[in-house]
Image (spheres, rainbow, N blue to C red):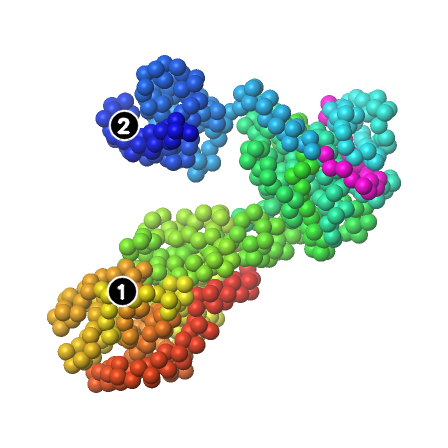
Amino acid sequence: MQKRQLHSLKQKLASKLYPLALLKNKNKIGNLKNLFITIKGYRQIRKNNLFDTEYYLENHESVRKDGMDALLHYIYYGSKKGYNPSTEFNTNKYLKENKDVEKSNINPLIHYAVYGISENRKNTSLTKKQIEKLREKINNDNKNKLPLIKKPLVSIIIITHNGENHIKRLLTKFTKLKQYNNYELIIWDNASEDNTKDTIKKFTNLNITLIENKTNETFSKANNEAVKKAKGNYLLFLNNDIEPLDGFINHLMNVILNKENVGCVGARLIYPDCSNSKINQEKSYTIQHEGIIFKACDYIKPVNKNNGQKYYTNTNIQVQQIIAITAACMLIKKSVFNKVGGFQEEYVYGYEDVDLCLKLHKSGYKNYYTPQAMLYHYEFGTQEMEENKVVTQRREKNHEIFIKKWNTYLKKQLKMDLINNNQIITDKSLTIAFVVTQAQKNTTAGDYFTAQTLASSLKREYGWNIKYLEKGKDWYNIPEYVDVIISMLDTYNIEKIKTNNKYIIKIAWPRNWFDRWMNKDYFKDYNIILSSSKKACASITQKTGKKAIFYPIATDTDMFNENISPQKKYESDYCFTGSYWMAKREIIDFLDPTQIKHTFKLYGANWDKIEKFKPYYQGFINYKEIPQIYASTKIVIDDANHVTKEWGSVNSRVFDTIASGKLVITNGNWGNQDLFNGKIPEYHSKEELKDVINYYMEHSDKRNEKIKELQKIVLNKHTYTIRAKKLKRIIEEYEF
């Protein structure tokens, strides 16, 4: 244990100190740009454990004897000699498949750490020994056979055409399987011209019904016809290029017999040794299929879930509901299959299985995937035998049929799945990107804090993912995984957005400067417009013809509440929080702290430029400090600027103060009327401000009574939890 701890300490020190060695030996790295990339990459490699020190030293004894940092050795010398940094990364293969890396003179592992991972570049290469171990692991994981008490007859339907080698492998495996034994094999041969039929006839020890069809029917047509010959109440559609593993039928049947309202059940499909494949060479013993999910791009696209992922990272997955599975291995009750009309015969070898699953889903059935049922799928062998032009034309036609039939339905289903985080139709939850000025901790941008507080509620309530698009930082290039954009800035021109997600929902949220928003030509192009002002909502609707939704800002009660402890350094009788940006503000004209006998403190930027406020100025404070400030005062002044006052938009300090259990006084009449029925004490002159402060300071009972009255309104109507629920409804109701 001590040895491990020492090693861990050395690695931590290395990540801090060794970049200095890189600087010292910069002549070995090349130009200055590559040097900085190398330093960044070194840290990324250490952080993400991309370098296996023990493996490297074990294979290169001279490095161990020299005592040189193993990763530095690899960067300086090892990569040039073709050494591998771990069993997970092949140096020569990465360079061979990424010619730009070789030309760049950047160390291959450095490149992978800094660029390759995000660009989804391939890095793995399995040795023969690794392949043997992995295949052994897959087989061992599958040893746990599931005994079943009930064993109804299962009709296994296999379609074949010139697939002699495939069918031989499949049937040979069936003679050796240890599993469910009550089945019949119905093999529909589509006019094979090789030895397929003769090969099938040799397996006399299996219960096979061979149907020798005279023409090469489509997959859909052949299966539908074969079903008519099935004696079992359960149908198992199985591709001829499958190699099943022990117990797979047991696991499939366990799901369909023990779950309610089952449509169909699918299995985990694994790539076999693909070293000789032209199109899947890198996928040996990785996941080929763990169900079918959908993602938004130019259309709602079906994809194999976890395709290409390492097998051993997915071993703990349990039975789960999913929208669709492949007919390469699909179990379904015959009565259910017939009820929904079987496979749609207008498809020609493509989309027919997904179509069937969607018919089941739309009819109220639940489709399932079970990882315990495992099979190898030699799909690449079949694909590579076909002519590319024929395949392309066929896929285009199938795609056209599928999109016309299902895209509208899938748009709605995908949106609701994302919103509710069901992960049946997709494997992710909704991602919202907020367009903000800045997203750093010490930013002064109020738009970011507003976005952040709403985002926290969305994440907490619904598990949604949050992303921030900062001004000027490539903020128009939107990743495909972003589902919703909420722009906090009128300067964000949505006409410049670039994304592969055609169905992204674009939301504008004006909270102030409403005229600026409305004067932008692209403003009307937003899918949804929110506004923090009722008056602005009416004006926006009139000007754009698009209904604006009243959506005020609110408060985060986790951040602002009565349980926050006061701090002596913030103590005051009354205070103001907010910055001065050289624009006219009523607080400058109306407030004279020398005429009010109670203690005053002022927080924000630039107030030292106002001479009379200098004695009370406490400097700029971080937004996270404001709860302590409100906890340490009695009254907070709200000075609505000329924009928010004119339009009736209510500032965050109003909600936050009330949530903190303190009294707020305001000069904003419109907003007070719209959101608080005029219950917040107001001031509209120097005398009124002085009087209202003195009154509520001298009458604590009246102050507390008013606070309770206002608190009830805020907690029932104006928290970000409530706003999150409303936004969810808005997105749900939006139709593309």
Closest to the observer, 521 or 341: 341
The answer to whether residue 216 is seen in the rendering is no
Coordinates of residue 564 in the picture (x, y in percent): 35, 65
Q: For mark 2, does the 10 Å Cα neighbourhood hold few (<14), some (14 to 19), or many (20 or more) residues?
A: many
Could you tell whether 251 is left or right of 692 in the image? Answer: right
Coordinates of residue 558 in the picture (x, y in percent): 41, 63
Q: For mark 1, does the 10 Å Cα neighbourhood hold few (<14), some (14 to 19), or many (20 or more) residues?
A: few
Q: Write the start and end of the magenta stretch as one range.
A: 145-167
Q: Amino acid at mark 1?
A: Gln
Which residue occupies the extreme left position in the image? 611
Relative to 570, does residue 91 appear above or below in the rendering? Answer: above
The answer to whether residue 708 is seen in the rendering is yes
Find disc 2 in the rendering and name its residue.
22
Task: Please say if the residues under marks 1 and 2 sit with CB atoms less than 8 Å apart.
Answer: no
Relative to 344, does residue 643 appear above or below in the rendering? Answer: below
Residue at left offset 16%, top offset 81%: 595
Closest to the observer, 505 or 519: 505
Could you tell whether 503 is left or right of 211 in the image? Answer: left
Q: Amino acid at mark 2?
A: Leu
Q: Quadrant of residue 575?
A: bottom left
The quadrant of the image that shows the N terminus is top left
SS at badge 1: loop
SS at badge 2: helix
Relative to 681, does residue 284 appear above or below in the rendering? Answer: above
Residue at left offset 45%, top offset 61%: 457
Badge number at residue 567: 1
Sequence-wise, the earlier of marks 1 and 2 is 2
Coordinates of residue 284 in the picture (x, y in percent): 58, 27
Residue at left offset 42%, top offset 32%: 49
Of the two numbered discs 1 and 2 in the rendering, the one whose residue sits closer to the viewer: 1
